[in-house]
Amino acid sequence: MSAISIRKAECTVADAECIVSIGRPVFTATFAHTCTPADLELFVEESYTVDKILTELKDHNTTFFFASMAGAEDEAETAFGFSQLRIRSTEPCLARYTKYIELQRIYFSVDVDHHGSGIARKLMEHNMGDAKDMGYEQIWLGVYEENDRARRFYGKFGFERIGEHHLLVGKDLQTDLVMIASLETNRTRISSNS
């Protein structure tokens, strides 16, 4: 298997284009069956443009990371996933926690050839390790209530449901489950797999 590397995204058009090239098809594949094509297109056109992602890359509360696998010796690394950590975001169900950070996005290429490659695990471990190094005690995320595959994946890292919030996809109101994991509980797992 090729080596997996993680790098922080930079505020460049090239990195914004890479995020868009992964984010648009992943979001579409995940949500196309949940809403009308018009609602889906409206959301994608608002959320996954180079200008929108460049604005997010400039935001000091947000950090993006890419997960890549090296190709042949004469090929550049290709990003197959990205994640986004966000500070200063919250939900009412987080009221009893004090030192948390949000994993706002963790997306992987819809190219099925890379499922099972370890990219998802490596990127999640990196995010949890980075959050722990920054002094956070918990990491939280929102996941579409019917995305069973993602929920099982998050469960492997100790994420548990603590509430829900709503997301507008176009004009369609959808429900995300809010899940949280202790970074202290996961420290040994993260350290041993890094």
Image (cartoon, rainbow, N blue to C red):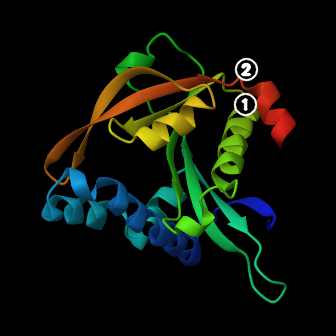
Q: Quadrant of the N terminus?
A: bottom right
- Residue 132 marker: 1
What residue is at 72 percent from the left and 34 percent from the top? 134
What residue is at 37 percent from the left and 30 percent from the top? 177
Quarter of the view holding residue 4 = bottom right
User: From the viewer's perspective, is residue 133 above or below residue 92?
Assistant: below
Are discs 1 and 2 less than 8 Å apart at CB?
yes
Q: Residues within 10 Å of mark 2 (few under 14, many from 20)?
A: some
Nearest the eye: 187 or 119: 119
Question: Is 46 left, or right, of 49 in this rendering?
Answer: left
What residue is at 77 percent from the left and 61 percent from the top? 5
What amino acid is found at the position of numbered circle 2 in the picture?
A: Glu
Quarter of the view holding residue 61 = top right
Q: Which residue is tagged 2?
A: 184
Where disc 2 sits, the SS reads loop
User: From the viewer's perspective, is residue 159 above or below residue 119?
Assistant: above
**Residue 101 visible in this rendered orientation of the protein:** no
Where disc 1 sits, the SS reads helix
* Percent of width and height locating residue 76: 74, 82
**Residue 20 visible in this rendered orientation of the protein:** yes
Q: Residue furthest bottom?
A: 74
Marked residue nearer the N-terminal end (1 or 2): 1
What amino acid is found at the position of numbered circle 1 in the picture?
A: Lys
* Percent of width and height locating residue 86: 53, 41
User: From the viewer's perspective, is residue 122 above or below residue 186?
Assistant: below
Question: Is 163 left, or right, of 61 in this rendering?
Answer: left
Nearest the eye: 71 or 104: 71
* Percent of width and height locating residue 190: 78, 34
